[in-house]
Image: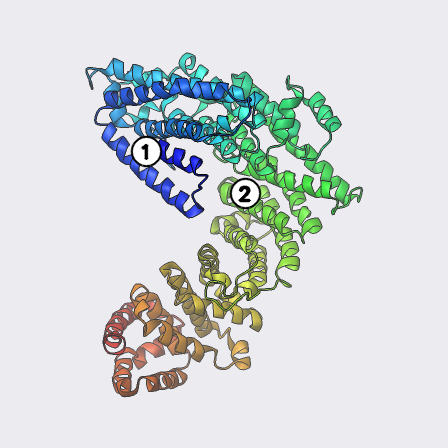
């Protein structure tokens, strides 16, 4: 009631919540509904009766409102209040009947199961009937709204927000209640568990869901939230299992969605009607021109999401009709893409032509939709489909390397493919991915790394060295991380094809291109910073010699980023940086691999040691990185003991009267025999490590007591 009154006031006064207040309001609503649901589950039957009574009270007015769609006029305060009241009731019912199952198998809440079972409640039949009746009421409301949307899609009375809420409810409810997974439940399988557990009882609901999605794809293609919930609903149903997928494939509305995808897969937004007619004649499927034109208006990103859901829904290999639909979906992407690539290679089309460029973007996004369907049945079929296209997708970078949007889309595609399918790739598929990634990264780096400018836009802390764009860099780093995984290298290291050295070369090539971009400003982005240090930490741990042999300018960039990272507030970043610093120092002790760099810049080691002491060890931040800081200090000290003593003397002078105590603390920490052993062996060894770790712990407590604490 309060939500209805608030909406009435906002509309009447022409007031709008700002973005921050809307977010706060949504969070508060989520908490209130979760609390109300927890209370309502003490008596499911009474709660359902209360909700049903309130819904039956507003339902006639709601249907009257939908019936008035198309008569003109604006949405007044009373109408807005009614729509908000209905929406709040749906949200409350959703929290009562379902749980948030992100990342888990959707399940019916135990309190609902108990209330609907013969042995759990004396009113179990009434409780089951109340839930069944409430679902039918929501179906009726959604059906009336959707049918009116086919005739008057622009009328505000139909409220896309209410449609989105209904789809959200059906998404959470359907994933748990339709064909429930019986192994998730301990008790007998009667009551609410049996209500929608058979094909004859589930088919009407699934048919209703697919019809709802079809209507919204064709008549509300620009309502992004509605389309997103529709695609989520399709995907949730497809992940339910073979029984639900068989019912989906057999449904007429689902078949039309597949046909719409096949017709519109390569249709740009600006195609003429004759092209649409030709595509319809080629595919068939009993589609109307209005349906095709509506689906064609879907944003390309949303078309890709619909494709992901269709692939998952059609993925059962034992279902011949589903397999035919799946092949149709994939073929409708592959053939147009190869046609575009052939035209570019033969110079029959100009890459800068806006239609060709848009077709390339559409193809990349649709291939990304295929990649994201990794939750399908037998997902190893995706690499078999994608492998022939990977070199051609990589080849697009040659033509569109200057277009940052296309570059980022390609990098995301390759990153997602490597991340999701790497464990199931055959050797030949690995080689194809590696070769295509090499070509992709080389073309990308030539246009976006060497000449990329990092602009300092202001002197404020928030805007310091703010980059104009960085997401493509993040995607490139993530791709390099995936290509550098040990499983990939082991799999490719065979007598034929590429070996691990070649893979290492391309990863280092990519790292070299990215290093100049890794300014302190760019590293202030948390996600980018974390992934960058994950990559660097892996490379230092696995291939320290290669890093030490980088050109001096690039080595300086790497070292600067490590020194910046070791005092970072994120403990994961700081520990990765300190481990990296220790790895470089240990490698120099073993192989003298930094000799060339030291001849050009003799103070590299002393600078690292001084900054480690002043920025980490002598600071309050030391407590969550004590061990890695100590393990970084030990090899730095062992490289040149005399210069290490000089650094200590210089640092100690900054602390005046405490200089003597600081010298005494270092004398207790740094023992000549330990340094000699580390310098000789190039590593500390287990016994020395344990001894130095204990000594360094005592050193930090001692130094912090008189340097930091007052």
- Is residue 442 at least partly visible in the picture? yes
Residue 365 lies, with reference to residue 555, above or below; the image says above
Task: Locate residue 278, reporting x and y percent.
Answer: 73, 25
Task: Locate residue 566, reporting x and y percent.
Answer: 40, 67
Q: Which residue is most to the top?
A: 200
* Residue occupied by mark 2: 417
Query: Front-most of 511 and 450?
Result: 450
Query: Residue at (46%, 32%) from the top-left corner?
Result: 161
Q: Callout 2 environment at 10 Å: few (<14), some (14 to 19), or many (20+)?
A: many
Q: Callout 1 environment at 10 Å: few (<14), some (14 to 19), or many (20+)?
A: few
- Is residue 206 at least partly visible in the picture? no
Task: Locate residue 316, reporting x and y percent.
Answer: 50, 24
Residue 356 located left or right of residue 678: right
In terms of secondary structure, where does tag 2 sit?
helix
Residue 120 located left or right of residue 136: left
In which image quadrant can residue 658 be found? bottom left
For residue 2, the mark is 1
In which image quadrant can residue 432 be found? top right
- Mark-to-mark CA distance, 1 and 2: 48 Å
Residue 668 located left or right of residue 154: left
Label whose residue precedes the other's in the sequence (1 or 2): 1
Q: Which quarter of the figure is the N terminus placed in?
A: top left
Foreground mark, 1 or 2, reads: 1
Residue 266 lies, with reference to residue 480, above or below; the image says above
């Amino acid at each position: 009631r309060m939500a209805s009154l608030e909406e009435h006031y906002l509309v009447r006064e022409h007031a709008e919540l700002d973005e921050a207040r809307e977010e706060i309001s949504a969070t508060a609503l989520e908490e209130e509904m979760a609390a109300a649901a927890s209370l309502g589950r003490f008596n499911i039957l009474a709660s359902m009766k209360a909700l049903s009574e309130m819904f039956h009270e507003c339902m006639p007015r709601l249907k009257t409102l939908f019936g008035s769609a198309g008569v003109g006029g604006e949405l007044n305060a009373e109408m807005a209040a009614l729509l908000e009241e209905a929406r709040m009731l749906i949200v409350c019912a959703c929290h009562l009947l379902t749980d948030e199952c992100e990342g888990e198998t959707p399940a019916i809440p135990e309190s609902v199961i108990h209330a609907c079972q013969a042995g759990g409640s004396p009113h179990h039949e009434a409780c089951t009937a109340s839930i069944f009746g409430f679902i039918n009421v929501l179906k009726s409301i959604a059906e009336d709204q959707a049918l009116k949307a086919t005739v008057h899609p622009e009328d505000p009375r139909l409220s896309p927000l209410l449609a989105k809420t209904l789809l959200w409810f059906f998404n959470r409810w359907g994933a748990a209640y339709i064909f429930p997974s019986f192994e998730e439940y301990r008790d007998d399988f009667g009551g609410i568990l049996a209500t929608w557990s058979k094909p004859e009882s589930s088919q009407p609901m699934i048919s209703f869901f697919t019809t709802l999605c079809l209507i919204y794809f064709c008549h509300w293609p620009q309502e992004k939230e509605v389309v997103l919930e529709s695609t989520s609903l399709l995907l949730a149903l497809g992940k339910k299992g073979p029984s639900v997928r068989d019912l989906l494939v057999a449904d007429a509305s689902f078949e039309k969605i597949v046909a719409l995808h096949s017709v519109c897969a390569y249709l740009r937004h600006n195609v003429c009607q004759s092209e649409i007619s030709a595509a319809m004649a080629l595919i068939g499927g009993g589609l109307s021109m209005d349906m095709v034109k509506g689906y064609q208006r879907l944003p390309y990103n949303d078309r890709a999401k619909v494709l992901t859901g269709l692939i998952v829904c059609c993925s059962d290999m034992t279902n011949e009709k589903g397999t035919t639909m799946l092949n149709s979906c994939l073929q409708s992407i592959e053939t147009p893409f190869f046609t575009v690539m052939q035209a570019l290679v033969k110079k029959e089309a100009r890459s800068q032509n806006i239609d060709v460029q848009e077709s390339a973007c559409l193809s990349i996004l649709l291939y990304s939709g295929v990649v994201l369907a990794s939750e399908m049945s037998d997902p190893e079929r995706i690499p078999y489909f994608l492998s022939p296209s990977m070199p051609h997708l990589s080849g697009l970078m040659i033509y569109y390397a200057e277009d940052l949007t296309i570059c980022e889309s390609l990098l995301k595609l390759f990153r997602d493919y490597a991340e999701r399918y790497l464990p199931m790739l055959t050797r030949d598929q690995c080689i194809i991915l590696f070769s295509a990634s090499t070509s992709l990264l080389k073309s990308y780096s030539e246009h976006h790394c060497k000449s990329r400018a990092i602009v300092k836009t202001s002197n404020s802390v928030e805007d310091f060295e703010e980059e104009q764009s960085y997401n493509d860099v993040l995607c490139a780093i993530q791709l390099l991380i995936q290509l550098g995984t040990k499983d990939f290298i082991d799999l490719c290291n065979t007598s034929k094809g590429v070996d691990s050295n070649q893979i290492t070369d391309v990863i280092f090539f990519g790292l070299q291109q990215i290093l100049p971009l890794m300014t302190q400003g760019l590293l202030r982005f948390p996600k980018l910073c974390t992934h960058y240090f994950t990559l660097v930490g892996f490379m230092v741990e696995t291939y320290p010699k290669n890093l030490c042999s980088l050109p001096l300018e690039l080595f300086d960039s790497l070292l600067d980023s490590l020194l910046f990272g070791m005092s970072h507030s994120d403990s994961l970043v700081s520990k990765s940086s300190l481990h990296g610093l220790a790895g470089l120092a240990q490698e120099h002790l073993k192989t003298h691999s930094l000799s060339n760099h030291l001849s050009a810049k003799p103070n590299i080691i002393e600078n690292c040691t001084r900054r480690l002491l002043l920025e980490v060890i002598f600071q309050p931040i030391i407590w969550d990185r004590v061990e890695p800081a100590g393990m970084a200090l030990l090899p730095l000290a062992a490289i040149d003991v005399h210069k290490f003593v000089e650094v200590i003397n210089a640092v100690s002078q900054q602390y005046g009267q405490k200089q003597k105590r600081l010298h005494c603390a270092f004398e207790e920490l740094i023992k000549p025999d330990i340094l000699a052993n580390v310098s000789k062996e190039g590593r500390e060894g287990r016994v020395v490590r344990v001894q130095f770790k204990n000594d360094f712990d005592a050193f930090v407590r001692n130094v912090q007591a008189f340097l930091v604490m007052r």
